[in-house]
Image (tube, helix red, strand yellow):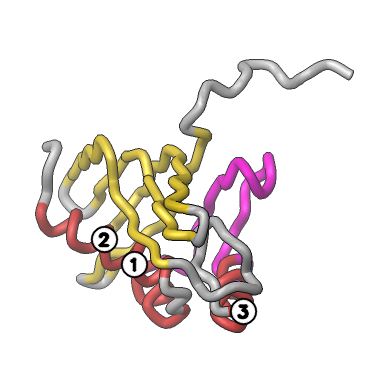
Amino acid sequence: MAHDPEIHAFLREHLQGIMENDIEAYHNSTSTDLTLYEWWVSPHRIDGLPFHDFMMAENARRGSVFGAEGDASATAPNFRFDLANLHIQRYADTAIASYTLLLSSGLAEGVVVAAHNESRVIIRIKNRWQVVHVHKSPAWAAPHMPPTP
């Protein structure tokens, strides 16, 4: 099924909490045994919540928006996110959402849009949806093989 209103609403709330550096909302919507790949951070898997807890706390302290472009010393930019090509696959208490995340930031010099592809695996644990795995990849044609020295 390409559109599932329950999972779509959960996903938007989950992402909004992340964008607003809301650690409590993040913990409520994310399993403690989270695994994720973030291509711009590390080529290796990241496990658990502490990595993002630190990132969100630092962004909140600096007044910046999670994932938004711009100068952290300046006023936090206006931002919005869109889920392009959202596709939701639901199998009982498991859902997979895949999409291209478009994060638009309003800066003094104009609007800047960052994009990357994401897949999020969401399962129902004790009657509550939680993200258990995230995989992000570039939304541009990355080379298949790493550059040679």
- Residue 16 tag number: 1
Label 1 to label 3, Cα distance in Å?
18 Å
Magenta segment boundaries in residue numbering:
30-51
Q: Is residue 42 above or below residue 56?
A: above
Q: Is residue 123 above or below residue 148?
A: below
Which residue occupies the foreground of this view, 75 or 114? 75
**Do residues under tags 1 and 3 come within 8 Å of each other at their CB atoms?**
no
Callout 2, which amino acid?
A: Arg
Q: The residue tagged with tag 1: helix, strand or loop?
A: helix
Callout 1, which amino acid?
A: Gln
Q: The residue tagged with tag 3: helix, strand or loop?
A: helix
Which residue occupies the foreground of this view, 95 or 74? 74
Whole-percent x, y for residue 108 in the image: 50, 61
Q: Which residue is mark 3?
A: 62
- Residue 12 tag number: 2
Q: Is residue 38 above or below residue 58?
A: above
User: Badge 2 local density, few (<14 within 10 Å), some, or many (20+)?
Assistant: some
Whole-percent x, y for residue 117 in the image: 42, 38
Whole-percent x, y for residue 13 in the image: 27, 67
